[in-house]
Image (cartoon, rainbow, N blue to C red):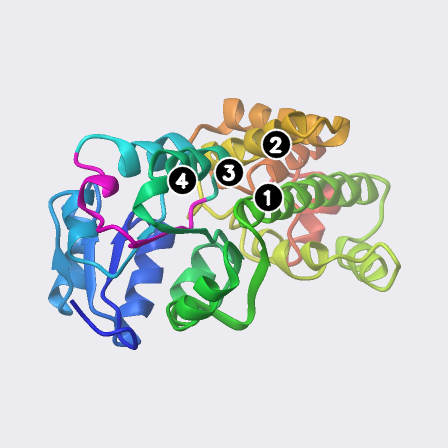
Amino acid sequence: MSTQESPTVGFIGLGSMGGGMTRNLQAAGFPLVVHDVRREAAEELIAGGARWADSAAEVAAASDVVITMLPTPRHVSDVVSGPGGILEGIRDGGTWVDMSTSVPEVADAVRAATSARGLRILDAPVSGMSVGAARGMLQIFVGGEAEDVARLRPVFEAMGDPERILHVGGHGAGYAVKLMINQLWFSHLVATAEVLSVGVKAGVDLAVLRDALIASPANSNFLQNDVLSILRDGDYDEGFALMLACKDLGLSVDLARAVGMPVELSGLVDQIFRRAKATYGDRAGEMQPFQLYEDLLGARLRLDAVGDIESGAAA
């Protein structure tokens, strides 16, 4: 087993997010033990010196810290507590960090079931999409004990922006913060799509309208930056599937229900995303709900195709 300064990191889940995160861990010099449902997802890492494990239990047995980055809470629960799972391999006093977008109940159940084993468990979900994962510039929201956060900070800094690795509170706080960030971002997407579509339909030049909104108190990071992937490139971010966005929205609404807060607006945004999923398919990009409004407009909102927009011709 490796030293505290250079822990062996076990990583389970090598998809669009986990793939970039593990490449950055490897570049930072952390020994890796990896597992995924698709062994081919690990080929580049193995070529770079990572060790392949045939199960989550094998990952845990060979690692100082085990990280999960998985699609849903059910996947997390199965990988941790199911047959061949992390709990079968992790040593007493070991560390598990869940960086998935999940809910507190999963990790709470693990803590309750393993209270005598002294496991160190943190929730540390991320923001920044697959681009941030590839660049090692994710924002990371960590819930757990302060000493564990400090101990694992070098690991987090290999994957994220050091200035945006935030200890947001105790167990479960990371999950809650990430769900609220997602909910607000998805709401920004729907609001921006509505406003731009109505303004263009009313005859305002798209670029002029966006510039006016940016100069106003209604500006947002989504309007100023994130929406450019659509307006300039027609990119609805297929790196993160719409079905996963709908999953995240459902989790945020469930969290609100669990704490007794009414969320009428969030519920409507959830419905709009689910309508987009029914229209464009599970694998469509997470920003595809924007296209619902473009379809109603009869044009694609593109900064380099204003003439098409003004004429009402679909791009």
311 left or right of 212 in image: left
- Residue that sits furthest to the front in the current view: 116
Answer few, some or many: residues within 10 Å of disc 3's Cα (few below 14, many 20 plus, some between 14 and 19). some
75 left or right of 122 in image: left
Specify the amino acid type for callout 1. Ala
Q: Which mark is residue 159?
A: none
Pointer 1: what residue? Answer: 176
Q: Does 45 sit above or below residue 179?
A: below
Specify the amino acid type for callout 3. Pro
Name the quadrant of the C terminus: top right
**Label 2 to label 1, Cα distance in Å?**
8 Å
Q: Which mark is residue 111?
A: 4
Labels 2 & 3 near each other (Cβ < 8 A): no
Give whichever of discs 4 and 3 has the lower sequence position. 3
Choose between 144 and 219: the one closer to the eye: 144
Name the quadrant of the N terminus: bottom left
